[in-house]
Amino acid sequence: MLYTILRIIEKLLALYFILYLIIDIGLFLYAFIVFRRGQKKPSKDYNWEQHPVSVLVPAYNEEVSIAYCTDMLMRLDYPNYELIIINDGSSDATMEKLIQRFSLKPKEGNPVQALTTSKIRSIYQHPVLKLMVIDKENGGKADALNAGINYATGRYICTIDADSLLDNQALKSVVRPFIEDPRTMVSGGQLAASNDVKLVNNQVVSSKMPKNIWVLWQILEYIKSFMVSRLGLSKINALLLMSGAFSMFRHDEILQVGGFLSAQNRHPYIKAHVGTGKQTVCEDMEIVVRLFKYRYDKKQKAKTQFIPGPVCWTEVPEKGKNLFKQRARWHQGLIESLYIHRTMLFEPRYGATGLLGMPYYLLFEMIAPVIKVLAIIFLFVAGSMHLLNMQWVLLMLVSVILLTAIITSVITAIVEYWSLTQAKTNRDALRYKTFKDWLLLISAGILGEFSYAFYKMFAQLKGFIYVIGKKNEWKKFERKGIK
């Protein structure tokens, strides 16, 4: 009986991992085609003055980098944008740094409170430039973004993390899809690790390959996630996540769906479709899924657009414990978002989102760490009962090493070839400049398959524990700041 059960489990696990591999290869092949053809250059320049953007930057204890990042964000090559920093009850000198660095003055008047938020303490304005700073009581990142939306005047809302910097042309790149395709409801671009990067006037002057193994693993993750997975998922309209570190939305539409999900939000749409008092640690995925639901319910076409060209530099964790917490929080947010919008799962009226996107994130993202743990337990049990062919297991391990090396090598080589036709920023984002750097990155990727992959798996399992314990925190890690 036990033998039969083990054989059934073996077949199910084999089927799952074969499907997983087929999907990964399919996304890889699509990325190969896109980059092999080369990215088409924009054929038309628009009157950007007619497309104002409000850049929102939620900040909590960001005294290390807030002044420098704000200064850099005020120099973007876009003729009509405002910058709104939201100090979410920081306990450090974030607010003082901003007031002192930019000579901010108190501003009178209150906006129409379309979205309910924690109490606003005061508003500060730059005497000349379009820079506003909102000082409010702590309410979390989503609450801070909602406060910024209440004061925003732009047609589009761009969300940026407080430790991030944008390439000069990034705003034009992510606004363009909204102008050219009415289906677009969210757009975003490539993220790159800013650790050990030096910038002058928004231009990278040094982007050497980091030596920190945790950073190397994340650089590879970003290349695979943004330049491969998100490209493919975006093509089939199954991309349900745009990084909160760099995303663009329509202002009017984000108000219609009730803004970002927070415990303080009492918007009618939130009450009707989500329920008041609910929140998630990863607001960036939940808002995208809710926008899909909103459009499909109104029988409108919807699309998320990932643009590989624009680059947002963001600092990533350099210590294992901080990375563990971050990955656990990300997985917690994934679980929460899928649970909140579970009625969309396998529902035909939600199109590719319900039939492809939601099932993909459920089966191959959310429960993937659980399946992997079950597979490890199966191997130990079957091995102890002498039901495994150890030569076969060894062959599989060697195959994994070779496949990882081949795919990683090809991906990085293709992206590098593509970057030669792009702006210098895109080449800098790859970080490897020499053959030695490239070998270091590939070696780190192979090593990561037998170390970091398990580390991340356990972090994701911790995310399940956070969900069960209803833990909800805007976690921070120590930052060095961008030089």
Image (tube, helix red, strand yellow):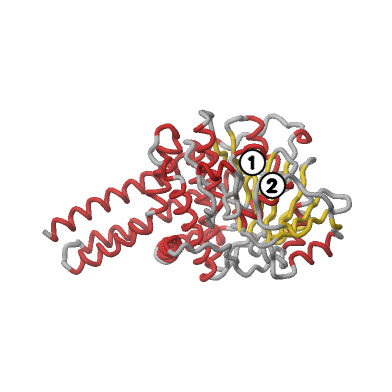
**What residue does disc 2 label?**
149
* Image location of residue 395, percent across then percent down: 28, 59
Q: Residue furthest right?
A: 127
Residue at the outermost left position? 1
Q: Where is residue 326 in the image (x, y as percent from the top left)?
A: 53, 63
In this picture, residue 71 sits left or right of residue 433: right
Q: Nearer the viewer, residue 343 or 84?
A: 343
- Please, what secondary structure does the residue beneath circle 1 have? helix
Mark 2 closeness class: few <14, some 14–19, many ≥20 residues within 10 Å: many
Q: Name the residue under label 1.
A: 255
Badge 1: how crowded within 10 Å, few (<14), some, or many (20+)? some
Identify whether 7 is placed above or below 322.
above
Q: Which amino acid does label 1 sit on?
A: Leu
**Residue type, mark 2 in image:** Ile
Q: Is residue 446 visible?
A: no
Residue 79: give x, y in percent of width and height: 80, 40
Q: In which quarter of the image is residue 62?
A: bottom right
Image quadrant in which you'd find residue 432: bottom right
Nearer the observer, 6 or 384: 6
- Are the residues flagged by discs 2 and 1 in contact, CB closer than 8 Å? yes
Position above or below: 89 against 179: below
- Identify the residue at horizontal 64%, vertical 30% (top origin): 180
For image coordinates 51% across by 50% down, the residue present is 225
User: Mark 2: which secondary structure?
Assistant: helix
